[in-house]
Image (cartoon, rainbow, N blue to C red):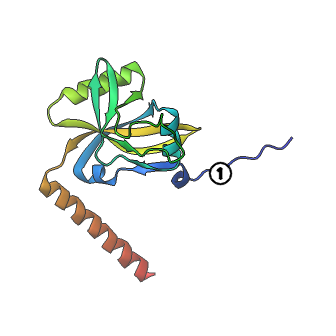
Amino acid sequence: MILLKKHHTKAANEVANNRKARHDYNILDTYEAGISLTGTEIKSVRASKMNIKDGFVQARNGELWLENVNISIYDQGNIFNHDPLRNRKLLLHKKEIRKITASIQEKGITVVPLKVYLKHGFAKVLIGVAEGKKQYDKRETIKKRDQEREIQRALKSAY
């Protein structure tokens, strides 16, 4: 019996990416969390119809909730379709939840979703414990990135 290994590309499994979060925040730590979704929600996620740009994580009653994330209504759904902006429970280990909750309670620290992807058929969200950047930090990051690009171009043209 021959077993064939499936080759999955990262881009194919990635559903949504929050590039703005990496620009606006310094990411201190990241965690992979499962998301509790309904049937029509997971179908919309698989169709990449979701927006995590304005999302954030909030701690309530010892649980973490993903808020302000828009999962569009499923096209083939019926009257029992989901609410696009409902709060969704994040699934993590208790130790991780306690650690993240302690971080959230610190001043200037927030938790934002960085990326949503599918892993073994389940929707996962990469959340980041982050602190906000000041305007001059953002400019400095852009300058560094531009300088690195110039160096890469110079090296490429030298060969």
Query: Left or right of 124: which side holds 18?
Result: left
Identity, as a three-letter code, of the amino acid under mark 1: His
Q: Residues within 10 Å of mark 1 (few under 14, many from 20)?
A: few
Kindly identify the residue that appears in the image at 39 percent across and 76 percent down.
Answer: 155
Count of labels in the image:
1
Residue ID at (28%, 46%): 54
Vertical comparison of 141 with 4: above or below: below
Q: Position of residue 17 (x, y in %)?
A: 40, 51
Q: Quadrant of the N terminus?
A: top right
Residue drawn 23% across the image and 36% down it: 110
Furthest toward the right, the residue is 1
Tag 1's secondary structure?
loop
Q: Is residue 3 left or right of residue 70?
A: right
Q: Please, which residue is most extreme toward the front here?
A: 79
Where in the figure is residue 139, as x and y percent of width and height? 17, 61
In the figure, residue 128 lies in which quadrant?
Answer: top left
Q: Quadrant of residue 62?
A: top left
Horizontal and vertical percent for residue 83?
38, 37
Identify residue for label 1: 7
Q: Is residue 42 left or right of residue 128?
A: right
Taking depth in this image into account, of 86 and 80 the one nearest to the observer is 80
Spot occupied by residue 36 in the image (x, y as percentages of width and height):
45, 29
